[in-house]
Amino acid sequence: MPNHTTLPARRRMARGPLPVLGAAVLWGTTGTASSLAPDGAHAAAIGAAGLTLGGLLLFLTGRGSLALVRATDTRTRWVLALGALAVAGYPLSFYPAVDQAGVAVATVITLGSAPVFSGLLAWWTERVRPTRRWSAATVAAVAGCAVLVFGSEAAGDGANAAGVFLALTAGASYALYAVIAGALIRRGHPSGAVMGALFAGGGLVTLPVLLSADTAWLATAGGALVALHLAVLTVFVAYRLFGMGLRHTPASVATTLTLAEPAVAALLGVVVVGERLSAASWAGMAVLALGLVILRAPERRR
């Protein structure tokens, strides 16, 4: 006989957190896939290629995307434009961050900082004051990222500071479009339409970057496979799942759930790419995971 008290919770998990976690697993392959692109591929062009094609797929398959852009009010159009700029800012900063700092480091900093930025945005836009739990999780995330970066073998070169800055920029961009998408979806717009409009706009912004770079790598088998992987799995499928999850999950919680991505990225970076992380870096990832546990632990009722 089914336990009726657990069914609603399971449904909420399946409709909210689980799609977000599924998206996080797919995003965890992004850095490794981009590192396998041909030598002539520029880091920003790799991200632009994935976003342009993936954004087009989201727009064409998102029911109501065109209607959302055409029939909405002026304020919503400005919000969509800001969200599109944030969408474009993510790959234009994340992929160069991977090139500068490595797959694991860039991914962990980006995803570790995103919940911090999401909480600050919620505080600023919705006047939701951060809780003690959020503050504790934030301290753990920042401390974990710091230990990971400065304990990494890659930290010895002079370019890592630029990689850290680019990864933080990517985290801020990610938080901004997650907050915007979540707000639009909870306002009643279909998640597919919102994601299609945002990512089509982001693709248009990044298209000049792609066209201005050398695109010969796209004509190679390896380059085409990397671009298709990024477009289909890490943009089209992942953001469909993310949009579904945002309907039932606040953006601040969703960005924290995606901290599962660094574990996937670090594992792939070590196993596939051959990156090596020191004991201090693994300890930093453990502290970052502790922040996730703190934030997602059940509240104790008084």
Image (cartoon, rainbow, N blue to C red):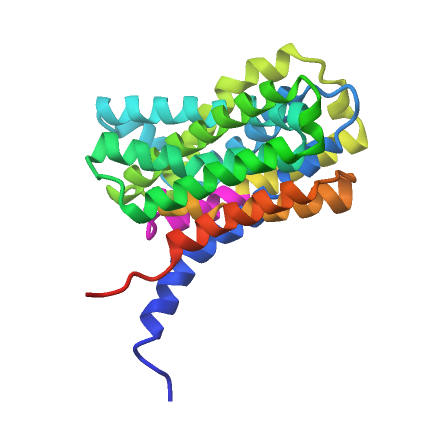
Which residue is at 23% across, 22% downward?
74
Image: 192 above or below 84:
below
Which residue is at 72% across, 14% downward?
214
Looking at the image, the residue that sits furthest to the top is 212
Nearer-the-camera pick, 42 or 296 = 296
Is any atom of residue 13 visible in this view?
yes
Is 125 placed left or right of 26 in the picture? left
Q: Which residues are magenta?
A: 237-252
Q: Position of residue 7 (x, y in %)?
A: 35, 74
Q: Position of residue 189 (x, y in %)?
A: 29, 41
Nearer-the-camera pick, 195 or 183 = 183
Which residue is at 63% across, 14% downward?
211
The rendered magenta stretch, by its main secondary structure, is classed as helix
* Residue 212 part of the magenta segment: no
Q: Position of residue 77 (x, y in %)?
A: 29, 24
Assign the N terminus to one quadrant of the image. Answer: bottom left
Is any atom of residue 57 visible in this view?
no
* Residue 251 part of the magenta segment: yes
